[in-house]
Image (cartoon, rainbow, N blue to C red):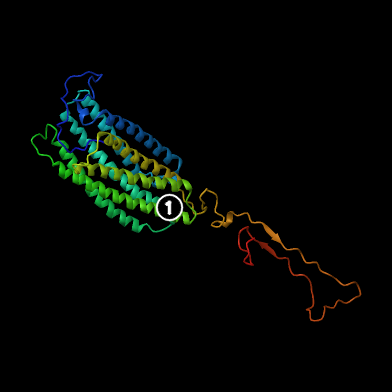
Amino acid sequence: MAPKGGGRGGGYGGGGGEGGSTCPGAFREDSLASTGPLFYFISYCVFFVVTVGIIYGFFRTRKRHGHAKHLLGPVFGLTIFCLLIAYALIITGTVLVECSVQSWREYPNWGIAWAIFYRLGEFLLLVLAFHNANATLRQGLNSSQTRLKILSACVLGIMGCLSIAVLAVTAYNSWTETYAGLGHDDVDSDTYLHLYFAYYFLYLLAAVVGSSISVASIFSLRSRRICPAKLRGWTIALAVSMTLWPLLTVAQYGSYIDPNGRWNINVSYAWAILVPFFQSLAFIAMLLIAKAASFDTTEQFTFNGAPDLHKNPATTVTPQYYQQPVQQSYPPPGQQHYPPPGAQPYYGAPATQQYYEAPGQPNHMGVRA
C-alpha cells in the first residue's frame, strides 16, 4: 500500500548525505525499506506502467469511437492522470531517499503530494462509476435521469466532504514528521484509523449502490433486447471491481483497529497488489463499456449483435404469398348460363388477394406462418 501518513517515523533509517548514483545499500533493513519494502516499490512501478497503458487506451478509444466520449470525458482523463502522478511521486520520493539524495525527514513531503493526487483520484473514480457510467448505460433506456442526478449529488457530496477530511488528516500527520512540523503533535493513531475505516466503509456502500444501479440498467436493456453481451460482461466486471477493492481496504483498516486482528506481512503484500489491481480493472471495464455502449434508435441489437426483427420490421425480408387466381368459366356460344337453384348469379372471379406474412409472425387467422 502507498503511505498512509499516520504514524511517526520510528521505523525509518538514517538520513542521506552519502551515496552514489548506484544507490548502494538501497532497501536494506535499516533504511526506509523498513516501512516501505522493495515489494511495495515494485508494485508502484508495475501499476505506474499499467496506468500508462490505460491512458493510451483512453485516447485510442476516444479517437476511434465518437460515442465513447460521453463516458471517456474530462473526468475520466483527470482521474487517471491523478493516479499516474501519484504513482510517479511515490516512486520518485522512494528512489531519492533510498539513494540518500534526500533525508528521510523529507520523505513525508512526497507523501503529502502523493496524498493530494491519490485521494482526488479515488474520489473521482467513484464519480465515474456511480454517475458517469450509469448515465451512459441509461441512455439506451431513453428515461429521465433526474433521479440519478439527485442521488449522485447527495452521495458524492457526502463522499467529497469525507475525502477532504481524510486528505487533511493525512497531510497533517505527514507534515508533523518533516523538519517544519517538529514539535507538533500528530493526530493519534486511533482517531485517524477510525476515520479511514469510516471513509472506506461509506465508500464501499456508495460503490455497492452505484453497482446495483448499473446491474439494474443492464437487465432493463436486456429486456428490450438492446444489450450486447460484451456490454453486460464489462458492466458486471465494473461492479465487481468497484465492490472488491473498497471491501479489501475496509478489511485492512479493520484489522488495524482490532489489536488481535493484525495480519502478517504476506497478507499486507497481497493487499498491496489486489487493491490497485481492481482499481485498474475498473478503469479498463469503463473503457470497454464506453466502446460497447452505442445505442442507435434506428437499429436495435439483440444479444449477438444481429438486428432484432421484432423491434425493427423494416429490416425484415418478408416473403410474399400469392393466392391462385380463380379461373372463370364461360358458357358455350348460344347457350345461357344459369346458376344452380339458391345460388347467387356469378359475375366473375374476385380480384387477386396478396398476403404478406413474415415467418414467425401471426397471420390473419392467428396461426404462425
Residue at point 40% right, 37% down? Answer: 57
Residue occupying the far right of the picture: 334
Q: Position of residue 279 (x, y in %)?
A: 33, 41
* Residue 65 in view: yes
Residue occupying the far bottom of the picture: 342
Quadrant for the N terminus in the image: top left
Residue at point 22% right, 18% down? Answer: 20
Which residue bears the numbered disc 1? 218
Q: Is residue 57 left or right of residue 340?
A: left
Q: Is residue 45 left or right of residue 236?
A: left
User: How many numbered discs, if any?
Assistant: 1
Residue at point 29% right, 45% down? Answer: 247
Q: Position of residue 18 (x, y in %)?
A: 18, 19
Query: Which kind of residue does numbered mark 1 sit on?
Result: Ile
Q: Position of residue 52 (x, y in %)?
A: 36, 34
Badge 1: residue crowd in 10 Å (few <14, some 14–19, many ≥20): many
Q: Nearer the viewer, residue 38 or 316?
A: 38
Question: Which quarter of the picture shows residue 19?
Answer: top left
* Residue 138 in view: no
Looking at the image, residue 75 lies above or below residue 11: below
Q: Position of residue 179 (x, y in %)?
A: 12, 31
Residue occupying the far front of the picture: 260
Residue occupying the far left of the picture: 183
